[in-house]
Every structure is written in C-alpha cells, then in structure tokens.
Amino acid sequence: MAISLQGITKIFGQGPTALKALDGIDLEVPEGTIFGIIGSSGAGKSTLVRCVNLLERPTSGKVLVGGVDFTALSEAELRIARKKVGMIFQSFNLLSRRTVFGNVALPLELARWPRERIAPRVEELLDLVGLAERRDAYPSQLSGGQKQRVGIARALANDPEVLLSDEATSALDPGTTQSILELLRDINERLGLTILLITHEMNVIKEICHNVAVIDKGRIVEEGAVLDVFTDPREKATKSLLSEIVGVNLPERFGGLDFSREPIEEGDLVVQLRFFGDVAAEPVMSDLIRRFDVDVNILTARIDHIRNVPYGTLVVGLSGEEWQRRDALKHLRSLDLKVEVVGRVGKALRAAV
Amino acid sequence: MSAKLFALLCSSLVDTLYMVGVSSAIAFIFGLPLGVVLLVTERGQIMERPALNRFLGSIVNAARSTPFIILMVLLIPVTRMIVGTSIGTNAAIVPLALAATPFVGRVVEGALREVDGGVVEAALAMGASPWQVIAKVLLPEALPAIVVGLTLSVINLIGYSAMAGAIGGGGLGDLAIRYGYQRFRLDVMFMTVAVLIALVNLCQGVGDFLAKSLRRDGRN
C-alpha cells in the first residue's frame, strides 16, 4: 500500500506557547519501497511517523494509506485499519510480563484469532526473524537486537502492508543495527511491504532506503532517490546530515590555508570530485596524470556504497603548468563527475602535505 | 497464660482475620475498577473524561482525608441500614471496606501509571480498543505493583480493624482495649500487639514474595 500525506500540520498546545511541530508536509511513499525520513532531533520526524497511524492526530491535513483516508475514519474503523499498519519502536515497547511468544501473539489476540491458529502463526513469525529458539524467554533476558526482532515479528503478525519504523535501530550498536536493517530489507523484498522509517542516522538511509526525504523544522526540505540526494545535496540541512558519512570537509590541517579564486603562479589547483556509479571503477586519476602530465595529490578521499552502487568524494590538488591544469580540469568536467573547484593555493599546500 | 485467655486471643484473631479478609475483598472488588477509571479517564489517557475524573478524584480525596475513627462514627446510620446493627465484626466491615476502597483505588491508579506509555502506544498501534489495552496491557503489566499496593492496603486494614475495636467492632483491637487497657492487663496488651506484629509481617512477606515471583523485568 502506498502512503500519501497531504498538507500535514501538527500544532502542540495553544496560544502563545503553541509549538508547530509539522508545517504542511506533503509526502508520497510509493508502494513496496523503503522510504526514509531523516532529520536531526527536534525536526519533527517522530511526530510525522506517528501521524501516519494517527497515534498523533494531525491538526490539519490528510493521511491516506492504500487510498483510505485515515483521518476520516471513526475510532472503530481506525482500529481495524491500524491492523494493516505495523509499527516498530526505538525502545521496542515489549510487554515485560509476556514471553517472546506471548508478545508476538498479542496482536493476534487483539484481533481475536482463535487460540489454535495463533500458535502456528507465531512460530512462523519467529522463524522469519530468527528467534524460534527463544520463544519462552522474557524480554529482560534478550539483547537489544533480539528485542527488536520480537518487535518486528509482532508488527508483522497481522500481515500488514505497511511497516512504520520509529528510530528502530537508534538504541542498537552498529553491528546489530546492520543485522536489523538486513532483516527489514529482506522483509521488504520478500513480503513486498512498504516501509516508512525515520532516523537521524544517514547510515540507515544509505543502507536500505530507496527514497529519502529530509525534514527540518517541521518541513520537508529535500526529497528524492537516495543516490541523487546523497551525491547532489542541495539544502544545508541535508549537507550537515551527510557530512558525517560523505565527509567532504578538508582535513583540519588545510583549514588555515588561503584559498584564492585567482590563478597563483606555481600554486596548486584544489578540486573536489564527487562520483557515483560506473565511473568509480574507471582509473580517472592515472588517466589524468598520463594525459596531461600533471601531478595529482590526493588530499582526502572517501568511497562508499549506497545499495551496492559505489560513490565517493575525492579532494585532489593538481600541480603543473597553468595550461596543463586547465586542460585537466576541462577533461574532468567532461566526465560523469561532479567537479567543484575549491580554490587555488600557493606553495603552502605542498608544505602542508 | 491461662487457657481462657488463649481461647479469647484465638477468637479475637479469627474476628480480625474475618473483618480484614471481608473488607479487603470488598475494597479490592470496588477499588480495582476505581483505580482503572481514575487513570484512564485522565486527560491524555485512553478514555479521557476530564470532568468524570475530577469528580471521582475529589470524592476519593474527601474519603481519604477523613480520619477513620470519624468515618466510622459518621457511617453508623449506613452500617445500621446494611447490617442491621452498628456493633460487632459485621458492622465494622462497612466502614473498613469504605475507607479502604479509595485507598486501593489510588494504589491501583499509581501502579497503572508506572506502566510504560510506549507499551500502551504499541498496543494502540496494533488496533487495540481501550478495553483491550486495560485488560491485555495495563493490568497484566502493572500486576506486580498492584500486588505490592494491595499488600499495603491489607496492612492498613489490619491497623484500622484494631481501631474498630474502639467502637465495639470485635477482634484484636477490641481485646486490647477491653482487657489490656480497661483492666490493666499488660500481658494481654503485649500478646495482642505481638500477634498484630506477626500478622503484619506475614502479610508483607507473602505480598513481597508474590510480587517478586510475578516480576519478569529482570529485577527479581
């Protein structure tokens, strides 16, 4: 089921102390995709995801899930509709006095499944998340990753078509985060579930999302396919969130250098290259050196993968005759790269290196 | 101790157990739903009814701020209406149960309040109705804390029941007043107090054990 948010506004409180947490959010989550919403804390992302199943009722706007307007449903209709929307949480929210089995059985009991049908369904779900042998353990006896697996099994019990994830990996260590993300991707692929997740970790988006929306101060400031947004971020909020993983900043020791826009005799041209896709596999640098007889000095570099597509950022200093550097730059610009001239630096750069 | 005195002590103990037992049972039966209603009708809760909540809250507060001995006297007409007399163990049960019900209500309310809001939210996200949240999430999750609270209520009732002796309610309190105090039988006084101490300790022990064995959050 696709999710469509139309003009969602949420105001907490009234009068002068009122707080506008969401300010006219429009969002389309296509069916079967993993859609990530990222923002720093206080940006409104948690409120937004809770608006989808109306745990938080928006002050204005419409929430359509699979074409059904949730905001127009009665309480009883909403309860039925919610069974098609699973949700997982940062703090897992498991019942401490129920076993793993009991926790996964809860949504089925709430849906009034007969007892003899509940047991096989729970077993099946525990198999899916790899926790079959822990079925009689209590949550306090589980690790964080195992608790989230119970949370996922529980969220899937009613065969939902949408899964909402509210910072589901934020309380987990990196290794466990990875395994939970793999499970979510697996579920998305195997069950064709639409997943809407919110996070403050770019890494999560990079790992499993198809599309991403950046939320800042209650508004969506940037949205698109993950690869596009990552390789060509436009908004300040996006860039600051990205900086932690694409790290395009020059190392600190270059910070004190004077960059000049004008050509400097005997100086270096500092260029930032961003590339993604096939071009990453080509020997761009060695080709550059051979063809233009320039010296290439790699100042900082970072290469990573988004859903198996390589992308990276490279900051290089080009030294040689002015015409050689110009030709080299022209050549770089003709390739499938994003080229940005950081500036020109005098001899000091070489000294700094 | 004479055999006669021992028999008296035993029959007083039975009276006390009877009064406390019956009034506890009544207080639980009415106090439990009262506590649930006090919590879920609060603003921002799953069945918010702020006006009802304020109304119930003020009644509970009024009942709880009235000293028990005054309440007992005030309730004499009601007791007569229900039991037919205002003297004896059966008559004492009425004020005891009435005093303990709001207490149990607050204790249950407090226990339910300790249930993690996230768990309730998770149940709502699964499409649980408010009644299902109460039955499947709030009460089971709060059970250990409720048991602790009920233990407290029973112990309170043991203390109150001794007070009921002052108006001829029967039981250990009655024994202590009539023999220990009015006849200067210090030995009876001490025996009675010793039995009361043992009784309170026993209740606390059983309550703690029960609560502990019900906990599954890793604190047991």
Image (cartoon, coloured by chain):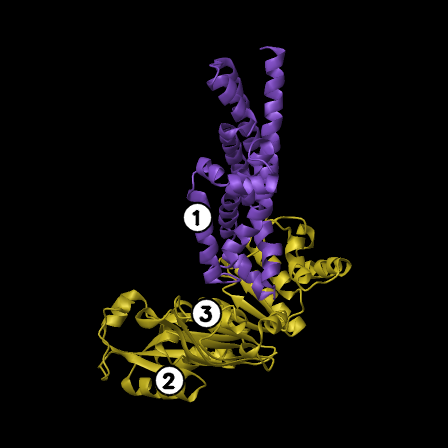
> How many C-alpha atoms fall within 10 Å of the one at disc 1: few (<14), some, or many (≥20)?
few
The answer to whether tags 1 and 2 share a subunit is: no
Specify the amino acid type for callout 2.
Phe
How packed mark 3 is, by other alpha carbons closer than 10 Å (few <14, some 14-19, many 20 or more), is many
Q: Which of A15 and A216 is in front in this view?
A: A15
| SS of the residue under disc 1 | helix
Callout 2: SS: helix
Q: In this view, does A192 lie to the left or right of B152?
A: right
CA separation in Å, label 1 and label 2: 89 Å
Which mark's residue is nearer the viewer, 1 or 3?
Answer: 1
Given the current orientation, which residue lies at the most extreme right position? A116
| Mark sitting on residue A292 | 2
Say the numbered circle drawn on residue A305: none
State the yellow chain: A
Which of pointers 3 and 2 indicates the residue nearer the eye?
3
First reached walking from the N terminus: tag 3 or tag 2: 3
Chain under disc 2 = A
Give the total number of marks visible in the rendering: 3
Q: Mark 1 points at which residue?
A: B61
Give coordinates of residue B108: x percent, y percent. 53, 47
- Quadrant of the frame with the C terminus of chain A: bottom left
Q: In the displayed structure, does residue A276 sit left or right of residue A67? A: left
User: Among the chains, which one is purple?
Assistant: B
> How far across and how far down the image is residue A162, in percent?
60, 73
Q: Specify whether residue A277 is in view.
A: yes
Vertical placement of A1 versus A255: above or below? Answer: below
Label 2 neighbourhood size at 10 Å, few (<14), some (14-19), many (20+)? Answer: some
Mark 1 in CB contact with mark 3 (< 8 angstroms): no
Q: Which chain carries label 1?
A: B
Residue annotated with mark 3 = A47
Query: What amino acid is at disc 1?
Result: Asn
Residue A233 location, quadrant: bottom left
